[in-house]
Amino acid sequence: MVALPPKKDSLPGRPRRSGSDARLAQLTREPAFVTRDGLVTAPRDEVAAPPPRPARRIGWFYPVVVVVTACLAWVWWRDLRPRPKPPPTPAAVAPQPPPPEVVEGLRTAQRQIDEDRLTTPPGDNALESYQAVLREAPGNGEARAGIDRIAAIYAQWAQIAEDKGSPARARRYIEKALIAKPDDPVLRAELQRLETRE
């Protein structure tokens, strides 16, 4: 053991002891390091350690992870569930061909339009042929379109007659167009305009 040099004063702040008491106190205290100059230093483990880290708070991260995981699990489970089967669709019904009378009536009406027999002579005109087709097949779109075409042809002829300076002839064409389409508001307004012009 290394002999310590004698000390003149006791440690500051402590009462002065006798030499043997001071030596005994020095030997019984925690081990210290003696430097070459004879200074007693504190043990190395008494060196100031860094302050302890504060405990980390959980915050929002983990609750968000739990919620997202639960949502993904629900979506996965929902896709794995057996889905109810859709009701069977009825077999598509093939459209039936129109009766021969309807086909013949449409051909006759088209021929009459080509020959400009739209509403005259009675008994042999396109309007009556289309109306006969509609009596046989009320939902026939071709016959309805044919009647609209007759009204449009008469309206066009009325415009041409008016441009040529013949409002009386234009009025007669509009009246014939109204025979094909009696509820058309545009044709009715045109008829009123032509009547006031005469």
Image (cartoon, grey):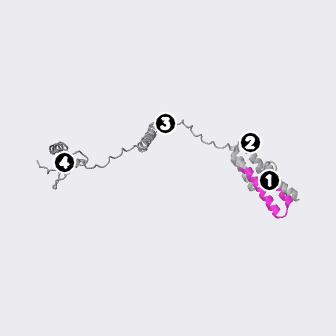
Mark 4–mark 1 CB contact (< 8 Å): no
The tag earlier along the polypeptide, 2 or 4, is: 4
Q: Which residue is mark 1?
A: 187
Q: From the image, tell me which residue sits under label 4.
A: 32
Let me know if residue 144 appears in the view.
yes
**195 is higher (above) or lower (below) than 76:** below
Dot label at residue 135:
2
> Cα distance, mark 3 to mark 1?
57 Å
Instruction: Measuring from the top left, give residue 33's x and y in whole percent.
Output: 18, 50
Q: Which kind of residue does numbered mark 4 sit on?
A: Ala
- Which mark's residue is nearer the viewer, 4 or 1? 4
Do the numbered discs 3 and 1 sit on residues whose CB atoms are within 8 Å? no
Q: Is residue 91 left or right of residue 125?
A: left
Which numbered disc flags the more N-terminal residue, 4 or 1? 4
Identify the disc placed on residue 83.
3
**SS of the residue at dot 1?**
helix
Q: Label 2 to label 3, Cα distance in Å? A: 49 Å
Residue at 87% x, 59% y is 197
Task: Point out the tag, 1 or 2, that comes first from the N-terminus.
Answer: 2
* Image coordinates for residue 163, horizontal then vertical, percent: 81, 63
Q: Examine the structure image and report whether residue 148 is included in the region drawn in magenta.
A: yes
Give the residue at x 74% y 51%.
148
Report crowding for label 3: few under 14, some 14 to 19, many 20 or more residues within 10 A (C-alpha).
few
Residue type marked 3: Arg
Instruction: Please report the bounds of the magenta region as a residue range.
Output: 145-174
> Where in the figure is residue 55, as x and y percent of width and height?
36, 44
Q: Residue at 42% x, 45% y: name it.
A: 61
State how far apart marks 3 and 4 are (Cα).
80 Å
Q: Is residue 193 left or right of residue 69?
A: right
